[in-house]
Amino acid sequence: MKATSNGSWQDGNSRDCALPLAIVHVCLGIAITRSLAFVLVLA
């Protein structure tokens, strides 16, 4: 996987770009930690 690309609008396959994958990982990390914090506060 390369860090730079021709642009996600030009390729048509956004899974080959590093930036969208990093954004998905950050969003998943935030969602998991927020849900764990919510569950642990209720416990």
Image (cartoon, rainbow, N blue to C red):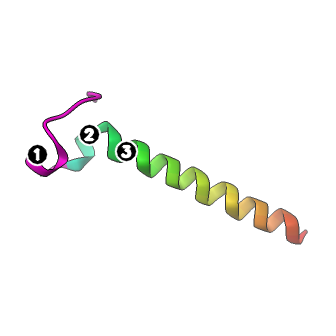
Q: Position of residue 41 (x, y in %)?
A: 86, 66
Q: Nearer the viewer, residue 23 or 16?
A: 23
Answer with the quarter of the image where residue 11 lies: top left
Residue at the limit of the structure toward the right, as seen here: 43
**Disc 3 residue crowd, few under 14, some 14–19, many 20+, Cα 10 Å:** few
Answer with the quarter of the image where residue 3 lies: top left
Residue at image location 13% in from the left, 36% down from the top: 6
Q: Amino acid at mark 3?
A: Leu
* Mark 3 lies on residue: 21
Residue at image location 26% in from the left, 46% down from the top: 15
Q: Amino acid at mark 2?
A: Cys
Residue at the limit of the structure toward the bottom, as seen here: 42
Decide: is 31 above or below 29.
Answer: below
Label 3 – label 2 distance at C-alpha: 7 Å
Assign the magenta stretch its main secondary structure: loop
Apparent side of residue 4 relative to residue 24 in the rendered image (left or right): left
Label 3 – label 1 distance at C-alpha: 15 Å
- Residue 41 lies in the magenta stretch: no
Which label sits on residue 11? Answer: 1
Helix, strand or loop status at disc 2: loop
The residues colored magenta run: 1-13
* Mark 2 lies on residue: 17
- Residue 5 lies in the magenta stretch: yes
Task: Assess whether mark 1 and mark 2 are in contact (beta carbons under 8 angstroms).
Answer: yes
Helix, strand or loop status at disc 1: helix
Task: Assess whether mark 2 and mark 3 are in contact (beta carbons under 8 angstroms).
Answer: yes
